[in-house]
Image (cartoon, rainbow, N blue to C red):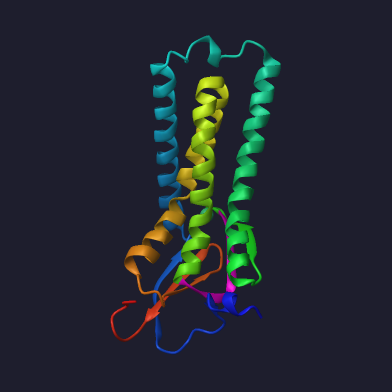
Amino acid sequence: MNKSKHKNFERELPSGYKQALHLDARKTLVGIVFNLISFAVLAVVMVLAIVFLDAADKTSEDLIPARLPHNLIALSVFAISMVGYIVLHELVHGVAYKALTGERLTFGMSWSCAFCGVPHIYTYRKAAVISVASPLVIFTLIFIPLLILLFFCSPIYFLIFSFIFGLHLGGCSGDIYVLYLLLLKFRGKKTLMKDTGPEQFFYVLEDVSNSP
Ligand SMILES: [Zn+2]
């Protein structure tokens, strides 16, 4: 086994740890709350996109393509990008987890979210933070220049990709909450997280505070 990868996780929960929190996206309340947050974020992004277009006087005829084929192409781009984004988001989690642990991944979909996890190990905080944050960071860095470009080139594609960007930011609400827990709440670098995909279990050292 690759030693540097093994430093990022444990196969068994070492002694001296206690479970600090269990998060389950499949629980009704958790699923509903995170989906409501996602829709709210998406709505804010779309309102901002329309306000920006309106301020630049780009909401008029440019936005309503007269020809149906144009609409069909735009709709296809929209559908493919949306599904593609969801798949790529989970793949980026997977690539990060794989690079840092080398362990077997799990991918899937529950009623409330798509997910990727590394269910058979306990991942140390640093590797968990990198894996959870990767899609948020990478896609935000891709979307912002893309949206700036589209804003000037094509109002309709600007709106389409604003929607996908809103979906991205809103859809990352669960990841952002996990990052908040890892970065601010369970800050000890020995903190372990077991990520089964829809569920995350957080473990902290039992004794001496949870300090690094
Ligand atoms: Zn995610």
Q: Which of 70 and 187 is in front in this view?
A: 187
Residue shown at 51%/41% (left/top)?
167
- Based on the displayed image, in which of its 4 quarters is residue 100 positioned? bottom right
Q: Position of residue 153 (x, y in %)?
A: 56, 20
Image: magenta residue range: 114-124
Residue 44 location, x and y as percent?
39, 34
Frontmost residue, 146 versus 178: 146
Q: Would residue 207 be visible to someone looking at this image?
A: yes
Q: In the displayed structure, does residue 108 sit left or right of residue 122?
A: right
Q: Is residue 154 visible?
A: no
Question: Residue 157 falls in which quadrant of the image?
Answer: top right
Please tell me whether the stretch drawn in magenta is mainly helix, strand or loop: strand
Q: Which residue is drawn at 60% across and 71% down?
A: 101
**Above or below, comparing residue 202 to residue 131 in the picture:** below
**View extreme (bottom): residue:** 15
Q: Is residue 119 above or below residue 132?
A: below
Q: Position of residue 69 (x, y in %)?
A: 71, 17
Does the segment drawn in magenta span residue 95?
no
Q: In this view, does 162 lie above or below 27?
A: above
Q: In this view, does 54 lie to the left or right of 80?
A: left
Q: Which residue is drawn at 53% across and 75% down?
A: 8
Residue sitting at 60 percent across and 47 percent down?
86
* Quadrant of the image containing the C terminus: bottom left
